[in-house]
Amino acid sequence: MKKLLILFILLSIILTACSKKEDNNSKSVALKLNLRGSTFEEQNINSKKTANISAVGGAVYSPNKSSMSINNEYYMDIELQEDNTDKLTTNNIIRKDGNFAVLVNRPVPNRVRYKMTVFNADGTYNTERNYIVGSEGTTAEILLDRGNRYTFIVYSVGSETVLPDITFANPANRTLETATVAVTNVATSNIDLMYYKWDSPIIDVPQYEINATLKHVFSRLTVSIDASATGYTLERPSSSFSQNYNNAVLKLSDASILSRTTAVTPNINYPSTNQLTLVSSPFIINA
């Protein structure tokens, strides 16, 4: 009888423990983050920006369109164009050199690092995780309390090694409104800052999926110079985009740039030379 009583007590303890575990799980929501890629939110060209083409006498022009003489026989038409079709735009050019700066969309490649941070409905910090594209399964799962609203922030600088931390104005009182992210070497190292934000409704399910498409904070440009109408090949031109800034501080709540510092004018790189058409490597504009 005593053995049966002891067995009954043990079974009761086990069942009670299992019941409490199931009850705790029923009050939690597991997050599943799906990174869908990246896109440019806006592709408006700011006509106040200037490009310096020193290969044609150091002339400075204001986009979107400009024209300048090279010699008595040739002139250059220069134009900034939006890439709304994800294709390089070309025009019919007669005895002129077309210089196009085109915005380019890029996917998020494997091994790039990114961070997701969770804030409560009142704006206070909850938790965060660092991920690597293609290896998300190695990151610990996020469990949140069910029945609440949350704000999810995802960001990346497009790097396999660098992922800047969040800075809070008051580390003892971490809130979304006072959170910033400082990025450095933007222009000289082509730091591609990307951002996503989602304000959830009340979450009352065991698993909640977030489908994040990162939006590029800075513009990415490519310069194409086409001299095929002239019959002349092009050597490596000396060109740059000014004014560009190397450092920026991102406001985490809305992706606005609070400050830009350290003005730089890095050269535009052309991988191939001595051809009828030259296409530069893509470069980041923080201006």
Image: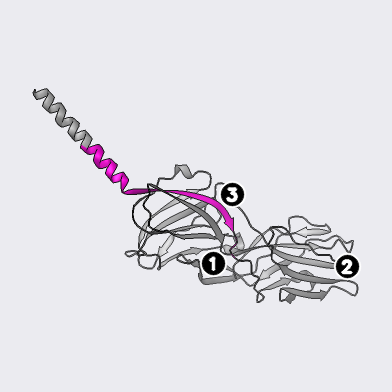
Going from N to C along the chain, the mark reached first, 1 or 2, is 2
- Around disc 2, counting alpha carbons within 10 Å, would you say few (fewer than 14), some (14 to 19), or many (20 or more)? some
Under mark 3, the amino acid is Pro
Instruction: Tell me: 172 left or right of 72.
Output: left
What's the CA distance linking mark 1 and mark 3? 24 Å
Under mark 2, the amino acid is Arg
Residue drawn at (75%, 70%) of the image: 79
Going from N to C along the chain, the mark reached first, 3 or 2, is 2
Under mark 1, the amino acid is Asn
What's the CA distance linking mark 3 and mark 2? 40 Å
Residue drawn at (51%, 69%) of the image: 256
Contact check, label 3 and label 2, Cβ < 8 Å: no
Q: Which mark is residue 109?
A: 3
Q: Which mark is residue 194?
A: none
Query: From this viewpoint, which residue is outermost toward the left?
Result: 1
Residue 100, percent from left and from top: 74, 65
Going from N to C along the chain, the mark reached first, 1 or 3, is 3
Name the element at disc 3: loop
What residue does disc 1 label?
A: 247
What residue does disc 2 label?
A: 95
Does 88 appear in magenta? no
Q: Specify the segment rendered in magenta.
A: 16-41
Name the element at disc 1: strand
Q: Quadrant of residue 158?
A: bottom right
